[in-house]
Image (spheres, helix red, strand yellow):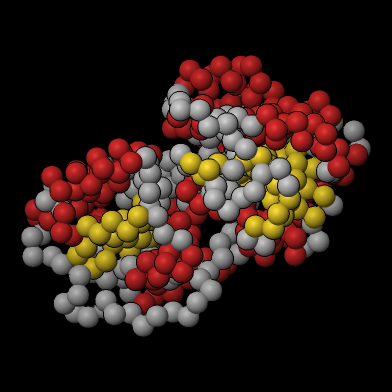
Amino acid sequence: MRVLHVIPSISPLRGGPSRSVIDMVATLRLQDVDAAILTTNDHGPGLHPDLVTGRWQWHQGVPVLAFPRWSPPVAALREFAFSPALSLWLARNLKRYELLHIHALFSYPCTSAMAQARWAGVPYILRSIGQLSPWSLAQSPGRKRLMLRLIERRNLQRAALLHFTTKAERDEAACLGLVPPSLVLPLGVRGPDLPAQPADHLGPTAPVHFLFLSRLHPKKQLENLLDALALLQRRRPQASWDLAIAGDGEPRYVAALQERARGLGLGERCCWLGFVAGEAKWRALEAADWYVLPSAAENFGIAAVEALAAGTPVILSPEVAVAADVARAGAGLVSASDPEALALTLATALERPSLSRRAAALNLAEKAFSWSTIALQLRDAYRQVLTSSAGR
């Protein structure tokens, strides 16, 4: 079974959707699925330093074909990841694949790939990566309404299957009246490939370590977390805690966040780690007492699941789709994202998480978000799509 995964970017700077597709393809290949990735050399504002363009290469253990992303000075056009060479290659090679798995909407590689697949009669599955949520559709709404009217609604309606990572994500898309069948299947997570380090932060006088690890983007609502911690500091001035902030974003926005932290009197309590990956990421997750993400909208929340896999309980807003699973498992706390409510939750978190809560975090990650189990289910979904398509 030959399956081509199409995604605008596999840059780690783009967050969970870009990171997870590499693990997805790697695990599918262990299940006898000939899976590969078609993408651009996008890397945030720049171009991916590790991807050659125009020829296949092995990247992080999977076959990847990348084409140049047009890089005009206008940010909105860069974000669209316009790539004529990608479309030309796909037009010539599309029918070599039995199935496409598309990851994203409102982006040139995916929009073009779905349209070409419709015309060529090649079935495709769409993972919308949360872009059908009310919050997402409200961002640049004019452009998205226009794209839906011109092409994306047809792309959506002609999909062989819509892949949602949580029931909450599927429910948010229900108002669009989409007719294709849907599959709710979470993303997986690979735990740290390194031995756990002895915890050096659990002494009775050591500060409680909070960790925010995500893209620095307004959707993540780091501002709310900073405001909540300022309230906590004012109400509990003797409490011992600190906040590590791991991630990167648009430079002016990052500078504004840092200035906000200083203005709130949090400068000495905040440690700005910048973008972290690999071993550094897992060490940061393991060193934290609590991972905190008060996001306005997350169709899944891959970094939160990675925290669980590191044995770190999480504090999530209800809009993070895995929050309900976390609450049921006792693997963390769920709090409204407004500063007042979040400050109250953080105050309860000044008591370190118990060993049983850490065990619940690990157990949830292992049982619900194992890539090997998920890949088997996805392979079965591929087979069902191909069987249905052959019968038409």
Residue at image point 27% right, 66% down: 209
Q: Position of residue 27 (x, y in %)?
A: 69, 62
Q: Nearer the viewer, residue 145 or 11?
A: 11
The vertical placement of 162 against 24, above or below, is above
Residue 183 in view here: no
Where residue 303 sits, quadrant-wise, is bottom left
Where residue 339 sits, quadrant-wise, is top left
Q: Position of residue 145 (x, y in %)?
A: 54, 19
Q: Nearer the viewer, residue 244 or 320?
A: 244
Where residue 103 sits, quadrant-wise, is top right
Residue at image point 73% right, 27% down: 115
Of all residues, the one furthest to the right in this rendering is: 391
Residue at image point 30% right, 43% down: 254
The vertical placement of 202 against 133, above or below, is below
Residue at image point 84% right, 52% down: 1
Q: Nearer the viewer, residue 90 or 173?
A: 90
